[in-house]
Amino acid sequence: MALNRGNLGNVTQVGAATTTAVYTVGSAQTAYIKSVLITNLDAVSTQNVQVHVVPNSGGSAGTASSTTRVARIGISTDDTFFFEPAYPITLTATGDTLQVYNEGFASNSINVLVLGDKEV
């Protein structure tokens, strides 16, 4: 199979106190997540962000929990963090997801961009 390299989607905005699937594996595909760029849009407060690798639940997206969390990151005001594991995170089943939880308050949103490869 050929690899499609680069962005694994567009920038996703994640609102405060929200968990969002920033990448979902499509039918009969495998994704290799190399890095996740997370930008704190708030110019006043630090944002805490959780990254979850969530297996599918009966072919649909599963739910993020403490057992799926792979990172918790504090991002300074108006800053960007590059989450880059030593080896790519491999998602192999339809409906597997990479989810991000923004622990922020009120209107403190973050932007997330997932980079890597997927088999096409």
Image: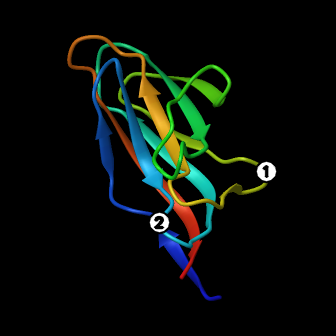
Residue 44 screen position, x and y as percent: 30, 14
- How far separated are the C-alphas under marks 2 and 1? 24 Å
Under mark 2, the amino acid is Gly
Residue 77 screen position, x and y as percent: 39, 22
Q: Which residue has dot 1 on it?
A: 86
Can you tell which quarter of the image residue 69 is in? top right
Determine whether 62 is above or below 60 in the image. above
What residue is drawn where x is 57% and y is 25%? 73
Q: Please tell me which of labels 2 and 1 falls first in the chain.
A: 2
Is 76 on the left-hand or right-hand side of 32?
Answer: left
What residue is drawn where x is 78% and y is 55%? 87
What residue is drawn where x is 34% and y is 17%? 17
Can you tell which quarter of the image residue 29 is in? bottom right
Is 85 on the left-hand or right-hand side of 19?
Answer: right
Residue 34 screen position, x and y as percent: 64, 58
Determine whether 117 is above or below 91 in the image. below
Residue 26 shows which numbered tag?
A: 2
Instruction: Tell me the element at label 1.
Output: loop
Can you tell which quarter of the image residue 79 is in? top left
Comparing labels 2 and 1, the label whose residue is closer to the camera? 2
Instruction: Tell me the element at label 2.
Output: loop
Residue farthest front in this picture: 58
Is 55 on the left-hand or right-hand side of 17?
Answer: right
Determine whether 29 is above or below 52 in the image. below
Is 83 on the left-hand or right-hand side of 23?
Answer: right
Characterize the local packing of mark 1: few (<14), some (14-19) or many (20 or more) Cα atoms within 10 angstroms: few
